Image (tube, coloured by chain):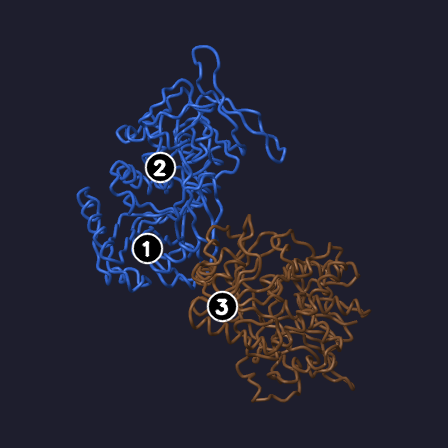
Chain colours: A blue, B brown
Amino acid sequence: MELIVGGGIVGLSVAWRLSRAGRAVTVVDPAPASGASHAAAGMLAPVSEVSYTEEPLLRLGVASLRRWPSFAAELAADAGLPPGVLAPSPGSSGAPSYGVDFRADGTLDVAFGADDLAALDELAAFMGKLGLPVERLTGRECRRLEPMLAPSVRGGLLAPGDAWVDPRRVTSALLAALERRGVPVVRARVSRLLRASEGPGDGAVVGVELAAAAGGGAVPAEIQADGVVLAAGVWSAELAGVPVRPVKGQIMRLRSAEPLLSRCVRGVVHGAPVYLVPRGDGELVVGATQEELGFDTRVTAGGLYELLRDARELVPGVTELEVAEVVAGLRPGTPDNLPLIGPSGTPGLTLATGHHRGGVLLAPLTAALLQGEEPELAALCSPARHHPVPGPQGFGGLPYDKTSGSEEMG
Amino acid sequence: MELIVGGGIVGLSVAWRLSRAGRAVTVVDPAPASGASHAAAGMLAPVSEVSYTEEPLLRLGVASLRRWPSFAAELAADAGLPPGVLAPSPGSSGAPSYGVDFRADGTLDVAFGADDLAALDELAAFMGKLGLPVERLTGRECRRLEPMLAPSVRGGLLAPGDAWVDPRRVTSALLAALERRGVPVVRARVSRLLRASEGPGDGAVVGVELAAAAGGGAVPAEIQADGVVLAAGVWSAELAGVPVRPVKGQIMRLRSAEPLLSRCVRGVVHGAPVYLVPRGDGELVVGATQEELGFDTRVTAGGLYELLRDARELVPGVTELEVAEVVAGLRPGTPDNLPLIGPSGTPGLTLATGHHRGGVLLAPLTAALLQGEEPELAALCSPARHHPVPGPQGFGGLPYDKTSGSEEMG
């Protein structure tokens, strides 16, 4: 039996795909679907304003986006939901949401000043070179697509193939699909990895030890497994010394009677990227701060202020909307911004973590890579490129590579 | 038995004082202490930046502030709480809170620009003329008192006699005191006032009809009473055609490990007044918008944005604080900004409503006026000055005074 440690969108996706492939799996998480996946906006936009120069990450994103339509459709079917809106369609905007609210109506990046416009031109050229569909628009054309955009928007870039999804619907659907498949989801916290201490498998991970349940409920002391997949996001660091660090994101959900936007809109305001993601149910998600403050998930006055200020600059009409929720999550950042997917170097332990801002986008690809698909992309994500810091909970016996950047992980 | 309709800070205060005076009382409210009192910041500052030219209102505020220390102390005693911090004292800042968190460490009004400074000078002169204690300060002196103030603060006005209180502690204490005194608090919604339809008391209010409980619980169909005191805030309009209108206020509670301020700080930023009220438990309350949008209690992106923007200008350090809560309430505004306290003109019906921004400040005075104290001040609040709009639920038979400004009540 494979044990998946972590019930976020990555862990649940891996569990679901492995189960569909006929493997026996179990998931363990103290509170599934409540971490970064719960906070995430759900943009499926491989080319982002901050990562477009990172070609390996872009390749992963494009490959995973390609998988999303069938992933969403199969998931909806497995979970017993009606199918989602699966293809780009002008009529899908503002339509009632289905399935996991997958929509492929594109992302519009907008620019206010001359510098931003030049950056859009560069981005367009880069995407063109890679053969990705892209359209350069004037300010007027942007407002024709999205009439609520600020009059100060001077130009834009439409990525018509981009999509988005509601991560909360995805994780609910994954939990429902796992339940229908009979996959156990153990609500417990893993206190440490169990290792084989004697014999030929010395040091191999053979299961996990569980912390006692807070409510005194019936939780086993440990779970034995043939293999452990560590998909615990930013908490992977303390379990196995994996080089991931918390990158806090604060996000806001606004409620709107009429949809304000029909696609994702993104822009750089005051030097910080801000995006607005419309939901099928009329919600508008505004994200997200990027803060490196350790394990801090407080929603702060400053974080909210920046989100509100920047969202207003993009779409002044947001001021009329009701604030439905504010929440913060911790993205698992890695030294090179690429995820850690594959064999850890320790027998019995596989990694599926370090997805940073890309957990939702990369979930389908992550599950596929762990099943041996697309070996060329798998090589980009191989944990072998980082040798984890040795320590009380680190991998025993692996050399410490001083050039790998792992110092900054502490 | 006197029936108090409305379990906000005004209704509960009236009920408590009447009960202490030996009268039989009952309170009826579907959700006591959940309306404007729940949202209120609790500043007890009679001279405010928007009302200082309104001398009658100022006189009411000064008289009620004078009553607050003994009101708070007696309330704490009656509710079985330890006494509050009752006197101005330099050492009380940041101290653990007691009782109803009454603190009298003053209000500091600050100014950024030349116009604001001139307004402070006028305010100081006005207060001096009325014999109210006040101190004009330089920007440096302001920052000496409150080191977290923005460097751009150029001057201030200290009203050392001003105080504040935690309205939620006050209403909890009032409910506890009522319970200890055996005063019934009926959780039900009043659907209409009952009137004597025959005989000499024709048209007199003789009780209330109650709406069926939502949960199907045991609620009587009506309550007969010797007299009804209408203290239902903005909902007084629909019950008796009282000329009150909803003035929405959005407010934010920030959480701070260390107190950022030791007294109330207020300023006019971008033309709108903003205030920061420190709580004994480390909370910092930021208020409040003033919006006339009908019965709308949504927290909006625009409202939050303004509060955050203006609070940052006053005290930049607020950006680090956690957002604990955002909430909106409806103040009952009147055409002349003065409350409606006293006989309504209809036999059996007394009013205690229309307190607008002053419900917390004026609660002790309101209770006293209804017991016949300070007749000169009572005259200022007499409902006779407004003749309510006649209508299906209006007072029968009273003339409609076209000069009273009641047109704007609709």
Q: Is residue A114 left or right of residue A293?
A: left
Are the numbered discs 3 and 2 placed on the same chain, yes or no?
no
What is the chain identity of the residue bearing mark 3? B
Q: Is residue B46 left or right of residue B375?
A: left
Crowding at mark 3 (Cα within 10 Å: few <14, some 14-19, many 20+) = some
For the point 62% across and 76% down, the residue is B131
Q: Which labelled disc corresponds to residue B273?
A: 3
What is the chain identity of the residue bearing mark 1? A
Q: Quadrant of the N terminus of chain B?
A: bottom right
Crowding at mark 2 (Cα within 10 Å: few <14, some 14-19, many 20+) = many
> Vertical placement of A66 versus A104: above or below?
above
Residue reaching furthest to the top: A199
Q: Which labelled disc corresponds to residue A269?
A: 1
Q: Nearer the viewer, mark 3 or mark 1?
A: 3
Q: CA distance from mark 3 to mark 1?
A: 27 Å
The percent position of residue B318, horizontal first and vertical second, equals 48, 54
Q: Nearer the viewer, mark 3 or mark 2?
A: 3
The percent position of residue A156, horizontal first and vertical second, equals 25, 56
What is the chain identity of the residue bearing mark 2? A
Which residue lies under the disc numbered 2? Answer: A364
Q: Earlier in the sequence, mark 2 or mark 1?
A: 1
Task: Determine the secondary structure under disc 1.
Answer: strand
Q: Amino acid at mark 3?
A: Pro
Q: Nearer the viewer, mark 2 or mark 1?
A: 1
For the point 63% across and 89% down, the residue is B399
